Amino acid sequence: MTNLTIALIGVVILLVLLIMGMNIGVCMMAVGFFGVWFVRGFGPAMTLFRNIPFTQATTYSFTVIPLFILMGNLAFHSGMSSGLYKAANRLLGGMRGGLAAATVAACAGFSAICGSTAATAATMGVVALPEMREHGYDDGLSCGSIAAGGTLGILIPPSTGFIIFGIVSGESIGGLFAAGIVPGIILACCYIAAISIVVRIHPEYAPGKLHFTFKEKLKALPGALPILVLFLIVIGGIFAGWFSANEAAAIGAAISLVYLIAVGKFSWKVLLDCLRDTVKTSGMIFLILIGAYVFGAFLTITRLPTILAEFVNGLAVSRYVILAVIIVIYAVMGCLMDSLAMVMLTVPIFFPIMLELGFNGIWYGVLMIMVMEMGLITPPVGMNVYIVAGVAKDVPLQKIFKGVAPMVLGMCVAIFILCAVPEVALWLPRLLGYIS
């Protein structure tokens, strides 16, 4: 049996285990360990299994993950999300469907300090859903806008997905952060456009309009100021070269803690809750990272990524046909598994192929993250839909999936724009000197 055959069998076994519901980190670790054992022997497999967990858990670059997660948790408990939603509501509430549009805008703003789709969806669900219900909005539209807006958490920096992609692929994390800003804004605008179209077709979904005076709008703007300042310090500091991504995450967490104390919402219970959530989320991500590195070592030994890259590069078809096939694969996989797990699982396989075909690595990272976001709001998994369903316990899942369907079409438009005009993602990294 050739190494290539063994690698393909390992991938199939991994997919079967994932479909059965086994933890993704444990799956990749087990398949990688037994795959190396089968190819190289028990000794090398044990050496790999002994070294990788310690090496990855103590890697300095990975400290950015728990620090950004802690920053988001502290910012949430400080009430930044409520002030942001109020400001977005005042600015966009005058249009039909304005509360749903304001929810998407607030999700985009909160994503700028959070980096997690789940946290963004859960936070804005608690803040925005009662407001939309109070004004008679359709539950499907309300929950759909929250679930879709939550996907922005992994695209607008600081993004955990970009951090992991950068570490695995070797691309600049700062460059990825810069590349995600404009596509994130475009995606948010596509969601808002989808909401506008839906409420024109079904006016009963968003009865009436809110009217705010110019003075009321001005008074609400300071509510968005804390998040804006935090974003400018953290992301602006990275772009300006004042500090690294790790240092930026630490500074952001410290500023969030100071703000939490300044607004009088600090307590030891709140701090412990933030730390507990950070440890829980970070532990889950680190387990996926360790498992992915063990599985990646197995793929490297069998040369599967290299062989695939050589095979695809030799095909007599346009590189855009291959890109379209990969996009479809990501869209399907996104319906079945966690987005961060997909980054770790697929980057070692597809990233060399994209480079061989002449695509820019940073652009590909943004495209991959955006396509994977689709899986967060499509069945059967649709993690963001389930998170929103946990907030709105009386709304059936079918209704939420129906409400989020127009947002999926909006995301398809954003993906098309990114593919048709790569400069949408690349002009800012080029301006900042991350790419030539």
Image (cartoon, rainbow, N blue to C red):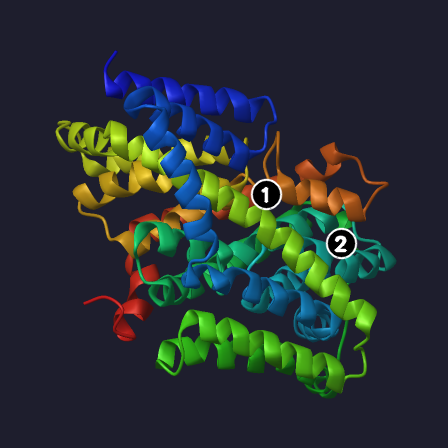
Q: Residue at x 59, y 50 (%)?
A: 283
Query: Going from the N terminus, do you reach mark 1 or mark 2 first?
Result: 2
- Assign the N terminus to one quadrant of the image: top left
- Assign the C terminus to one quadrant of the image: bottom left
Task: Please state if 179 lies on the left or on the right of 360 as rendered.
Answer: right
Q: Position of residue 407 (x, y in %)?
A: 58, 46
**In the rendered image, is residue 43 in sight?**
yes
| Amino acid type indicated by mark 2 | Ala
* Disc marking residue 419: none
Q: Residue at x 55, y 42 (%)?
A: 408
Q: Residues within 10 Å of mark 2 (few under 14, many from 20)?
A: many
Q: Position of residue 4 (x, y in %)?
A: 25, 20
* Disc marking residue 406: 1
Mark 1–mark 2 distance (CA, rounded to whole Å): 15 Å
Q: Residue at x 50, y 81 (%)?
A: 233
Task: Please state if 164 lies on the left or on the right of 354 as rendered.
Answer: right
Secondary structure beneath label 1: helix
Q: Is residue 346 above or below residue 434?
A: above
Label tally: 2
Secondary structure beneath label 2: loop
| Amino acid type indicated by mark 1 | Pro
Q: Position of residue 393 (x, y in %)?
A: 84, 42
Q: Is residue 327 above or below residue 56?
A: above
Q: Residues within 10 Å of mark 1 (few under 14, many from 20)?
A: many
Q: Which residue lies under the disc numbered 2?
A: 206
